[in-house]
Amino acid sequence: MKIAVDAMGGDLAPQAIVEGVIQASSELPSEARIVLIGRENTILDIFRQHNFVPTNIDIVHAEDVIEMGEHPTKALSQKPNSSIAVGFKLLKEKEIDIFCSAGNTGAMHVGALFSIKAIEGILRPAIAGLVPQVGGGHAVMLDIGANADCKPEVLAQFGEMGSLFAQYTFQLEKPRVALMNIGEEEQKGSLTSQATYPLLKQNKRINFIGNIEGKDLFTNKADVIVTDGFTGNILFKLGESLYEIARKREINDEFIDKTNYESIGGSPIIGVNGNVMIAHGISSPLAIRNMIGWAYKQVKSKAYLHIAQALN
Amino acid sequence: MKIAVDAMGGDLAPQAIVEGVIQASSELPSEARIVLIGRENTILDIFRQHNFVPTNIDIVHAEDVIEMGEHPTKALSQKPNSSIAVGFKLLKEKEIDIFCSAGNTGAMHVGALFSIKAIEGILRPAIAGLVPQVGGGHAVMLDIGANADCKPEVLAQFGEMGSLFAQYTFQLEKPRVALMNIGEEEQKGSLTSQATYPLLKQNKRINFIGNIEGKDLFTNKADVIVTDGFTGNILFKLGESLYEIARKREINDEFIDKTNYESIGGSPIIGVNGNVMIAHGISSPLAIRNMIGWAYKQVKSKAYLHIAQALN
């Protein structure tokens, strides 16, 4: 298994990224290797700073960098030697099993759509957020930012994609799928959520448990939380902010610690023909280290193949 | 000043409501009286249970009750002697200065629209949530549930209504108005939020500071948070859930305590010709007591008159 990491993407790249990879490398099962994509000399310099001699890390040189503010589509076509463009090329050619980056989120999303492409039949791939639950474990919430406006059919499909993801990544037999809404009753909500409810209810391939509300986000009511990328992004970022608030107020709590973005490190893109993981722009070494752990689980789960099979 | 409270509305009514009123009555400035609307004998029984002799409470008898599950419009027309219908009749006739209820939210919203009516020029009145901030104080977020689907012009008007509310209720000279969105840049967001941004920016009567993100909900970035009733309701309920999560985990923190719905107790309807406050269905005596404190502040602020003046 080859887990590729963009060394150049992220506000603290390449330093924090390479340091996270160094930390992760000693914990990785022997079947896995890390592929660092970026400026080879820069990466080797950071290895040397830490007197680190890699045994399970390969470097693929990429001269260019897509900056955070760049226009995704333009940047990808103008910079074929950027770490993100090279990563997707390798992913498409199946030289790597997953591509992870803390760089330009738009470029990661567009790169996935243009290279490995959406699974046939998938209306819109989604970015899925892993949301810690007070009882332990995580729910998967989708979308958290790729699609700000979603039609009911798109949301309904998120329910099915999310269910398959949860089934294979969390190893749950019948993941509980819920629609994030403003009331429990079927007829509640926006026009879009009212139209989405029956589509989810009719789908016999998922275990739809109905609507949940904002208060249920962390309370282990659902394994899969269906929402558009507007509400989902706002909820997800609010969730991540709790750790920062608690830290400043010197609150120590195991659950709140898990809301720290660093404890997960990455959000997968679901609905594309391969494994892609997007990390936070401000990713620290710890975040990258934990992201690599989740990336390993995601490759093992083969969730994207199961999604493709389910649709054909 | 007469602060009217629906004795019969709420999951724990009338017991919890009347007990909250008893608690509040001793704290209220001498210029204010409480008007309890509901079944007189039931209310007097609860007074007797507590050996309570009211000095600043009047009772207005109302025989009927609109239950939580009833259809708002039907219930209001079929039950003119319900506590909610009687309350709005008194409010319309200016016999009371504010009407507060923990009962059927839909009936409270429809009752306000049918009796005192929307202020001329207001496209959609909104339910405004008071959101505690980590630095102290509150932001006002609107809408939190009355309008699940909002057009850009409606959202832009929320910004102006909210600004006037914050100016007069929080006594701020130039409240900071922000749009809840999924990125800081102007062009980010859903189609609706992209169209709302320039409308808020062009409005010279408000101090628009741009987009904020989910992570900024509690962090004192804005005094007025503009959002539709779908996202706003989900965010508000997630915020309220933090206290419950913290309580179960034995986390004691002053800020988290303020996220307890009981610490505010009520959410005003903004944009109507009068003062209306909606309390949580599960309102406890403490919640009712605190709601009455906010109700007093709201009447004093005359915010609804300032909103009406600003539009004419």
Image: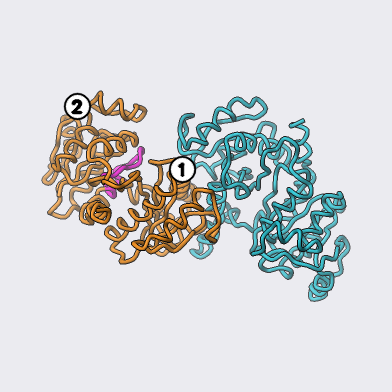
Chain colours: A orange, B cyan
The relative height of residue B284 versus residue A109 in the rendered view (above or below) is below
Please tell me whether mark 1 sits on a helix, a strand or a loop: helix
Res. A254 in view: no
Left or right side of B49 for A215:
left
The percent position of residue A63, horizontal first and vertical second, equals 19, 26
The percent position of residue B277, horizontal first and vertical second, equals 72, 52
Amino acid type at image mark 1: Phe
Answer with the quarter of the image where residue A49 lies. top left
Is the residue marked by circle 1 packed among few (<14), some (14-19), or many (20+) residues within 10 Å?
many
The percent position of residue B17, horizontal first and vertical second, equals 73, 65
Disc 2: host chain: A
**Circle 1 is placed at which residue position?**
A230
Q: Tell me what residue is drawn at x 70 percent, y 56 percent.
A: B73
Disc 1: host chain: A
- Mark on residue A8? none
The percent position of residue B186, horizontal first and vertical second, equals 49, 29
Residue A141 highlighted magenta (yes or no): no
Q: Tell me what residue is drawn at x 48 percent, y 52 percent.
A: A195
Which stretch appears magenta? A276-291
- Mark on residue A63? 2
Amino acid type at image mark 2: Glu
